[in-house]
Image (cartoon, grey):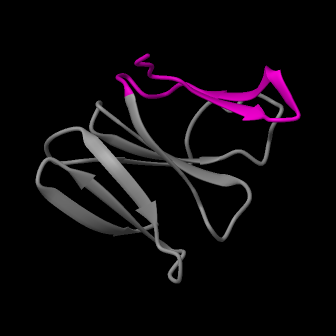
Amino acid sequence: MDSCEVIILDVRVPCTPVARLSNHRACVNGIAWAPHSSCHICTAGDDHQALIWDIQQMPRPIEDPILAYTAAEGEVNQIQWGATQPDWIAICYKTACEILRV
């Protein structure tokens, strides 16, 4: 099912969402946890955006991402944090791949 909302679950209590991230204006295509942090996640979507969230405030509602990037053209299809360079993230859209310092 296509959705513009990301729902974070605790597998120990899967019936109750821990958080809902709902700032995308179109379908979400990808989710990536930051390898260096337990509280940062990046989401990517058909709305041309890659959004970085700080979920440290859970279970309080998370209203807005801490960083938003809009791709020049096309929906963001893939995202990947740098494993050895945690300040960098790769986003892919159309036929392009951009490496961003965050």
Residue at the spot 81% in from the left edge and 30% down from the top edge: 60
Q: Residue 52 at what x, y percent from top left?
A: 52, 49
Depicted 72 relative to depicted 98: above or below = above
Q: Where on the picture, by quarter, is residue 14?
A: top right
Q: Residue 97 at what x, y percent from top left?
A: 21, 62
Residue at the spot 29% in from the left edge and 31% down from the top edge: 46
Q: Where on the picture, by quarter, is residue 8?
A: top right
In the image, taking residue 95 as reference, residue 91 lies left or right, namely: right
Residue at the spot 37% in from the left edge and 22% down from the top edge: 25
Bounds of the magenta segment: 1-27
Q: Where on the picture, by quarter, is residue 101?
A: bottom left
Q: Residue 65 at what x, y percent from top left?
A: 55, 41
Residue sitting at the far right: 12
In the image, taking residue 84 as reference, residue 44 lies left or right, namely: left
Judging depth in this view, the residue of 56 and 45 nearest the camera is 45
Residue 84 within the magenta-colored segment of the rendering: no
Judging depth in this view, the residue of 83 and 14 nearest the camera is 14
- Total residue callouts: 0
Residue 5 within the magenta-colored segment of the rendering: yes
In the image, taking residue 69 as reference, residue 74 lies left or right, namely: left
Q: Quadrant of the N terminus?
A: top left
Depicted 40 relative to depicted 16: above or below = below
In the image, taking residue 24 as reference, residue 26 lies left or right, namely: left
Residue at the spot 59% in from the left edge and 50% down from the top edge: 41
Q: Residue 70 at what x, y percent from top left?
A: 29, 45
Judging depth in this view, the residue of 2 and 97 nearest the camera is 2
